[in-house]
Each structure stands twice: as structure tokens, then as C-alpha cells.
Image: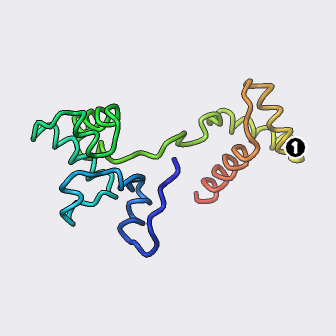
Amino acid sequence: MAKPKPPRDDPKGDALARDYALNAHPEAVSDALFTSNPFFDARDLIQVRYEMVRRHQADGVPIGNVASVFGVSRPTFYKAQSALAEHGLPGLIPQQRGPKGGHKLSAEVVAFVDELKAARPDLTVPQCIAEITDRFGIIVHRRSLERAMARKKKRLDSL
């Protein structure tokens, strides 16, 4: 997920971007609270989503109207509503998208590469990848394998 870039010299914008909570389209929020009250910041995605759901639930504003005024689609509204109901306010905090780690490079695969390197120290990364493909039937990117091995080495060095 590409983080939206805040304006320069903007500590709050920097913090929001770092936490994936910077609204990519603050200009789309036309709700009166966000346009007239400095407390409400249309750049703060969590504040926008919370107020959007609150506006529907507490004030009874129809979902279509709320979604329009807050610059989102109806499915986005429903997703925010569900996240808030299931997890409370932390449910509105955006999560980093994509895989969170080397999902192909299990501990078994890394151990296999360690055994290969121990038996044949001159083995190159492409040769290791070919061996992994033959043994496990998966295709691993060169950098993924290099990172996994570096992480393992770093863990061993810290012991």
C-alpha cells in the first residue's frame, strides 16, 4: 500500500502517513464539521471514518448521504462500520497491506538451504533456488532467499 505523501514540514501529516492513517483524499470530505471546525481534520483517516459511522448511527443520517459527504463509497462505509463494531476504535486503524513476511520461505525451506550450504559451501543462490524448486515445488525470488538467510544469520548472531 503506497502511503499518501503529506505536505512538507507537517509533523501531524508525517505521523499519519507513517501509521498509514493519512487520508489520501481529504478534499473529498465535505462534511460541515470537517470544513468549519479546526478540531476535525479531514487528513486523519481514523477520525473521518469514526465520525462517518457515528453520523449514521447517532444522528440517523442515511448511509448513502453519509458516504457521499465523507467522500467514500457505500462499501467503504460498511467496511468501517463493521470494523468499528467488531474491534472498536482500533478496528479503524489501517493495516499495512500485502504479505507480512516470507510466506513461501518456511522454516523447513530455510533449514533445507542451511543443510545445502553446509554440505556444499560453494553453492550459489540460483543453485539454491533450483534445489528449492526441485524439492518443494515452489519458485522463490533471489532477494527473498537472500533476506531470509540474512534474517536467520542476524538471529543467530544475536544469541
- Image quadrant for the C terminus? bottom right
Residue most extreme to the right:
122
User: Position of 129 compared to 64: left or right?
Assistant: right
Q: Is residue 67 left or right of residue 117?
A: left
* Name of the residue lying farthest toward the bottom: 9
What residue appears at the point 28 percent right and 41 percent down from the top-left corner? 68
Which one is in front, 149 or 30?
A: 30
Residue 2 vertical position relative to residue 7 in the rendered view, above or below? above
In terms of depth relative to the viewer, which is nearer, 110 or 159?
A: 110
Label total for image: 1
Could you tell whether 116 is left or right of 85 in the image? right
Q: Which residue is mark 1?
A: 123
Mark 1 residue type = Leu
| In the image, farthest residue toward the left | 59
Helix, strand or loop for disc 1: loop
Give me the residue at 35% from left, 50% from top: 28
Horizontal and vertical percent for residue 87? 26, 38
Residue 108 x, y percent position in the rendering: 65, 32
